[in-house]
């Protein structure tokens, strides 16, 4: 299991996120329009995984990846949380988030398949802040669980993994 922290309290996940060189698990999430969102093939993918868009750090990461997506060729950015699609759509509409996909894992096994669902702490059941970068062939290029939930991911490392 991976370990992060919520404040000073250690928090564990159901497993480990995919490791560099491994194949990214396929998934089916629910988009803001309640349509299926799956792992794209033939393109690079950045998965920005977080607990809830209703928190400052989570919303900041969605905004930042939206900015970065504009300059990432042949790359799809998917923001994933267990927020309901209604909340994700409302946030994206209000914030002008239009260069990324947001998707809900509320009715999915994504959290356990990716090893990022938190098993303890106040936010157990939500997803730990994680970034996974996937190459065109489905292989993982970068994987990071942040040391604390309140810490933004290493955007530079995620972009660098894309080459």
Image: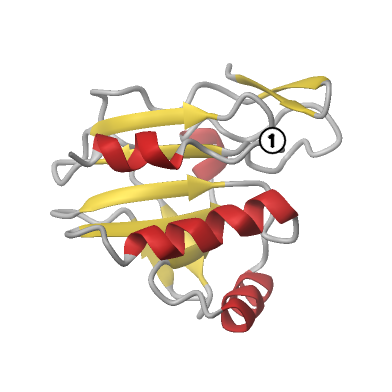
Residue depicted at 67% across the width and 47% down the height: 51
Q: Could you tell me which residue is drawn at 30 percent across and 23 percent down?
A: 20
Where is residue 32? Give x, y as percent: 53, 75
Instruction: Please determine whether, in this image, residue 117 is positioned above or below residue 52.
Output: above
Looking at the figure, which quarter contains the N terminus?
Answer: top right
Q: Position of 106 compared to 5: left or right?
A: left
Residue 56 in the image: x percent, y percent? 73, 55
Mark 1, Cα crowd under 10 Å, few <14 / some 14-19 / many 20+, is many
Tell me how many marks there are: 1
Residue 54, percent from left and from top: 74, 61
Please tell me which residue is depicted at 49% across the width and 57% down the height of the picture.
64
Visual colour scheme: secondary structure
Relative placement, left or right, of 146 versus 121 is: left
Foreground residue, 76 or 124?
76
Q: Nearer the viewer, residue 38 or 67?
A: 67
Q: Position of residue 45 (x, y in %)?
A: 29, 50
Asked whether, in this view, residue 99 is left or right of residue 6, the answer is left
- Residue bearing mark 1: 149
Question: 157 or 88: nearer the eye?
Answer: 157
Residue 46 visible: yes
- On the image, which quarter does residue 8 sit in? top right
Q: Secondary structure at mark 1?
A: loop
The C terminus sits in image quarter: top left
Residue at horizontal 68%, vertical 72%?
87
Question: Can the viewer see residue 106?
Answer: no
Q: Quadrant of residue 86?
A: bottom right
């Amino acid at each position: 299991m991976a370990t992060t922290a919520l404040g000073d309290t250690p928090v564990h996940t159901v497993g480990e996120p995919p490791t560099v060189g491994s194949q990214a698990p396929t998934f089916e999430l629910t988009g803001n329009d309640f349509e299926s969102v799956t792992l794209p093939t033939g393109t690079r993918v950045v998965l920005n995984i977080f607990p809830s868009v209703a928190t400052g750090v989570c919303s900041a990461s969605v905004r930042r990846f939206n900015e970065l997506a504009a300059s990432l060729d042949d790359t799809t950015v998917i923001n994933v949380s267990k927020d309901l699609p209604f909340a994700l759509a409302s946030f994206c509409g209000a914030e002008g988030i239009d260069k990324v996909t947001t998707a809900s894992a509320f009715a999915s096994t994504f959290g356990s398949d990716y090893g990022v669902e938190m098993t303890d702490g106040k936010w157990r059941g939500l997803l730990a802040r994680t970034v996974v970068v996937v190459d065109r062939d489905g292989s993982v290029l970068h994987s990071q669980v942040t040391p604390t939930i309140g810490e933004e991911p290493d955007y530079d490392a995620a972009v660098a993994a894309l080459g």
